[in-house]
Amino acid sequence: MKGVNIVSVKDNVAIINENISKACKAVDRDPNEITVIAVTKYVSIDRAKEAIDAGVVNLGENRKEGFLDKHQALGEEATWHFIGSLQSRKVKEVIEEIDILHSLDRKSLAKEINKRREQPLSCFVQVNVSGEESKHGLAPEEVLDFVKMAEAYGNIRIIGLMTMAPHVEDEEKLRAVFRKLRALRDEVQAQGFAHAPCDFLSMGMSNDYEIAIEEGATHIRIGTSLVGNESNGGDNR
């Protein structure tokens, strides 16, 4: 049986906003600094529309097909974040519809985006801070050289760094990953690159977004806790 969404998205949003406020208060941050992205990859267009109606206008998809279907249906109602690994051969099919890319992680992708976009694309550089083989992204020591290289591509604008923490209960392990990404962001920011202001940190999902906020996250990507999961499986954190 497919997952059933009992709680409305509006109710979920209220809970998440309360948690964001608590996390921000704990570290003296303004909740308005936090952008909530509804990860809608395992829910219907109608459920994604519920998120928009509840005030979450940033939607995240990680596959071309789901992204294009929802974009066609909801279009200008949302700001569109592509949060999954993007194959270079698929860039031409989606790149003009994406507002923000969270998974820039290789030169070939930067080159293809630069070729296909008419205007600069805001990108997060994806970093595999935890070193897990199952995760995409640059190694931390590769980030600064990659950002420098991206200056050659006028249609790439690096607005921040992104990572996925391990799915573990150990809070200190999570904090270590988030702190490492923040330190890398600060290192890039200190360079003063015109093409890479690197103001933002995309980190934190349903199970760890409060910790991520305490460690500096500006963009959190929430699936199950916000819109639920209407599929038979899959991780919609």
Image: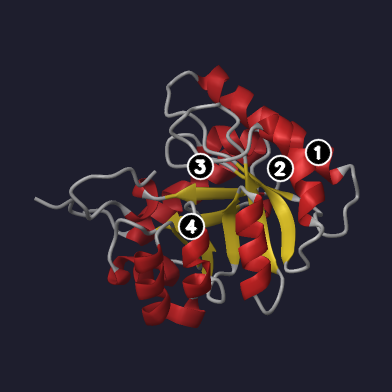
Q: From mark 3 to mark 4, how far is it between C-alphas?
A: 35 Å
Q: From mark 2 to mark 4, how far is it between C-alphas?
A: 36 Å
Q: Which residue is mark 2?
A: 29
Whichever of callouts 3 and 4 sits on the residue coming sooner in the sequence is 3
The mark found on residue 87 in the picture is 4
The mark found on residue 19 in the picture is 3
The mark found on residue 186 in the picture is 1
- Colour mode of the rendering: secondary structure
Where residue 47 appears, as percent x and y from the top left, is: 31, 66
169 sits left or right of 213 in the view: left
Q: From mark 1 to mark 4, how far is it between C-alphas?
A: 28 Å
Whichever of callouts 1 and 2 sits on the residue coming sooner in the sequence is 2
| Of the two numbered discs 3 and 4 in the rendering, the one whose residue sits closer to the viewer | 4
SS of the residue at dot 3?
Answer: helix
Where residue 153 appears, as percent x and y from the top left, is: 76, 63
Whichever of callouts 1 and 4 sits on the residue coming sooner in the sequence is 4
Q: From mark 3 to mark 2, how far is it between C-alphas?
A: 13 Å
| Of the two numbered discs 2 and 4 in the rendering, the one whose residue sits closer to the viewer | 4
Task: Pick whichever, 212 or 28, lies toward us.
Answer: 212
**Residue type at the position of mark 1:** Asp
Task: Pick whichever, 58 or 32, lies toward us.
Answer: 58
Which residue does the image show at 82% across and 59% down from the upper left? 195
Quarter holding residue 120: bottom right
